Amino acid sequence: MHSTVAFLLTSLTLSTTAIVLPRDDVRLAVNPACGDYSSSSVKDVRGSLPDLKTFSTIVTFGDSYTDGGKHDGSPLGPAAINAPNPSAGGRHTNGPVWAEYLAQAHGATLKDYASTGAVVDVNQWPERSFPTSNDFLTQANNFISQRNLTDPDSTLYVVFFGIGDYVESLDHNNSSLSLQTQHILYTINRLASSPIFGKNFLFIDNHGRGTETPAGLSFKSQIFKGMNSIQQLGLNTGFVDLSTMWDGVLSASSPGFKAFGYTSVEPCLVSSESTEGSCEDPEHAFYWFPGAPTTVTHKLISDYVQAVWDQC
C-alpha cells in the first residue's frame, strides 16, 4: 500500500513538473536548398570555401541585420538591453547578431563594419534621406583605409546587403537594382585586390524577407551569377539564400513558425523606440520589432549559415 501511494505521488510530481517546464528552444526546422553555381535557380552554395574552422577572422559588411553596435571593426560592446532602449548595445535586436554567434562558434575574431539603415550606394537614391551615409562602398573604403591587414587564407569576408535597396525599389515602382549588383561585385573585387588580397567571400541574401518582386529576384540572381564569376578568377566564394528560412517560418503550413519553436511571427515590440509594451516571451518571438529579428532568430541565421557549410 505504501509503495502504491509513493508511486502515485511520484507520478503526480512528475506530471506537475512536466506542465511547468519551459517551452522548447527555437530551432532550425528547414534544410538549406543546396546546389552549385550551375543551377538554373539560386541555391545555397558553399562553393570552394574552406571549412569554417579555417577562419580566425570574420569581416562583415551590411545593414541592421549585421550591425553589432560598432562600425569600424573594433571589438563589440556587451549585447545588453538598457530599458527603455530596445537596442542591445547598439544592435537592432535584443542580443547578439548572427555574425557574433558564427564567430563565437568557431573561435574567430569578428570585425564588423555594418551600419543600421545602410544601402549599397546612397547615391543611387538621391532624393532619400537615409539614417546613415555609411553604405557598402563607404564600409569597404573604411576597412581598406585602416590598413589593418589580415591573413587572406584565414579571413572570411561576408557581405549581407539588399534589404534597404529592395525597400527603395518598391517605393520607386519596382525599379531595377542592377546598379546595386554591379557595385557589390565591383567592391568584392576591390577587396580581392591590393592591398587586401582577400580570398574568401560569402554573400548572404534576404532582400525580400518573405516577399518577392521581379527586381528583387533579378538582384539575387545577378549576385549569384557574379559570385560564380568571381570564383572562376581563383577566389573562394559562397552564397546563402535566407529565403528558405524566412519562407519556412512565415508560411502557413510548410513548415510554419510553430515547427521552429516560435509562438508568433508578430514583432515583440511595436516600434524600435522603446521596450514599453514588450511581449511576454521574446525567447520565442521571430521579430524583436517590425522587420528586425530577435536574437534567437539571429542564432538561427548563424545555424543556417553553418548548415550550408555542413550540407552543401
Image (cartoon, rainbow, N blue to C red):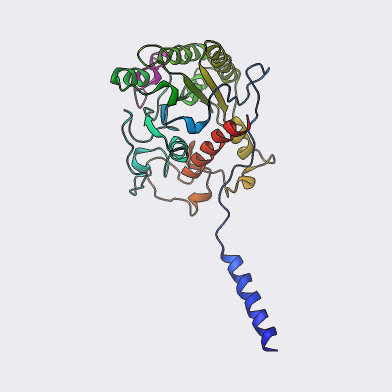
The part of the image, by quadrant, that contains residue 62 is: top left
The residue depicted at 31 percent of the width and 32 percent of the height is: 74
The part of the image, by quadrant, that contains residue 16 is: bottom right
> Total marks drawn?
0
Residue 23 % position (x, y): 57, 56
Q: Is residue 218 magenta?
A: no
Examine the rendered structure and indicate whether residue 44 appears above or below residue 258. Answer: above
Quadrant where the C terminus is found in the figure: top right
Q: Can residue 275 be seen here?
A: yes
The part of the image, by quadrant, that contains residue 22 is: bottom right
Taking the image as shown, residue 202 lies to the left or right of residue 113, namely right
Q: Is 7 in front, or is 149?
A: 149
Residue 78 % position (x, y): 34, 44
Q: Can residue 289 be seen here?
A: no
Q: Is 148 in front, or is 68?
A: 148
Residue 270 % position (x, y): 45, 43
Quadrant where the N terminus is found in the figure: bottom right
The range drawn in magenta is 121-138
Magenta: predominant secondary structure element?
Answer: loop
Taking the image as shown, residue 203 lies to the left or right of residue 146, namely right
Residue 98 % position (x, y): 47, 37
Q: Is residue 130 magenta?
A: yes
